[in-house]
Amino acid sequence: MTSVYFEGEDNDLAAFGYHRDGKRGKKQMVAGLLTDGAGEPLSIQLYAGNTSDPPTFLDAVEQLKVRFGTEEIAVVGDRGMIKALGQAAVGEANIRYVTALTDPQVRKLLATGVLPLDLFDDQPAEVTVGDQRYVLRRKPQTQARERARRADQWARVRARIEARNAAVAKAPRCDPASSLRGAQVRVQKYRLGGWVSVRLEGRKVVGTEDAPAREKEAQLDGCYVVVSDLPVAVADTQGVHDRYLDLTRVERDFRTLKTGLLEIRPVFLRKANRTRGHALVSLLALKLARALEQRVAPLGLTVDDAVERLKGVRLVCLGEAKLGLWRLADGYSAVQTEVLGVLPKLAAPVLSLGKANRRRLSNPRQGCSSG
């Protein structure tokens, strides 16, 4: 799922909701992209801008069963997509699922002993409980990045506290309580409240950290848990893990649609059916872009590079332009030929008749023969 913002106020699907674009103050629509296992887009659906993830997931399940007529299938969704409501829906529809647990869910399973902390490693490990399979993994690069980010944020807060304390010491009329409120806001902003506390001692703000609490906070750095009800015969531990990571392909397609090559947003339409038509055309363009990328990637070219080269492939005018007689060129430059060589072969050069000539051939004047 993603959101697409609107320019203006009048649109049948426009509504205020959770902005994934960070475009506060603008109405939006919610778009859901459904792909197959290889990442090939199958359909795109638009919803009102205030639609949450679970209803859109239920709609996707209905499409798979009714519209596409599937019988044995597994759906892969992110943490917010397949929750308790979604899992119940796929269970009733006899569809398997692959998703991931949220941080509170993981900590709860650790606290109850369902998941052991020592199983988190750089290679996927599995714990099976009934019909549910939990695949655990820790990424060392992500772990190092998250710990560095946490240390950097705490250093920023301390530096700000020290600078404010120095300013208060030089100005007797400064209110120390204001310094404390500012420090509390920063601790909350950087989500350090679980192991950092700030208090006022005289006219100075003092920040302290709880080392055990900080270590507990950091124990899941770089860790994630994928959960699925797929049978082992269908997908092993690595297969379940990899299918979840395939969601990055969908995210990449969304970037192509929204901010990359195609730019589905912003939307300047009003009626719901026209807005959905705009999304459909964007989906077809996405499929063309993916097909073009697969063909030109071995050449070391991007889609943008290939499109730029193909701009020089044009029709040649025969005679005066007003006659509307056009044909493809007999040859192209080396850079254009390189791209054309990996594309489906073009038909032999033919005449392209203008509107007036086509009408004359299909509707000959009285007394004249078209033969």
Image (tube, grey):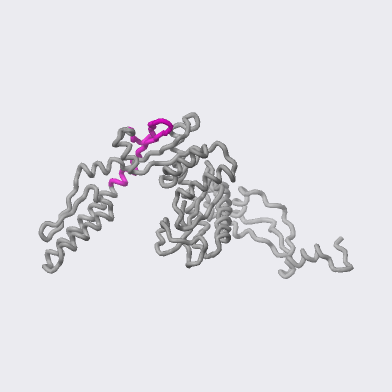
> Could you say where residue 253 lies in the image, as x and y percent from the top left?
50, 50
> Could you say where residue 239 lies in the image, as x and y percent from the top left?
46, 35
In the rendered image, the vertical position of residue 343 relative to residue 276, given as above or below: above
Magenta-colored stretch includes residue 126: yes
> Could you say where residue 204 lies in the image, as x and y percent from the top left?
13, 59
**Which residue is more in the foreground, 10 or 237?**
10
The reply to whether residue 298 is in sight is no
Q: Residue at x 55, y 60 (%)?
A: 272
Tell me the magenta residue range. 119-147
**Which residue is more in the foreground, 248 or 78?**
78
Q: Is residue 334 left or right of residue 192?
A: right
Magenta-colored stretch includes residue 366: no
Find residue 112 and report its image quarter: top left
Q: Residue at x 31, y 43 (%)?
A: 221
> Could you say where residue 247 lies in the image, as x and y percent from the top left?
46, 45
User: Which residue appears farthest toward the top when viewing the image?
Assistant: 233
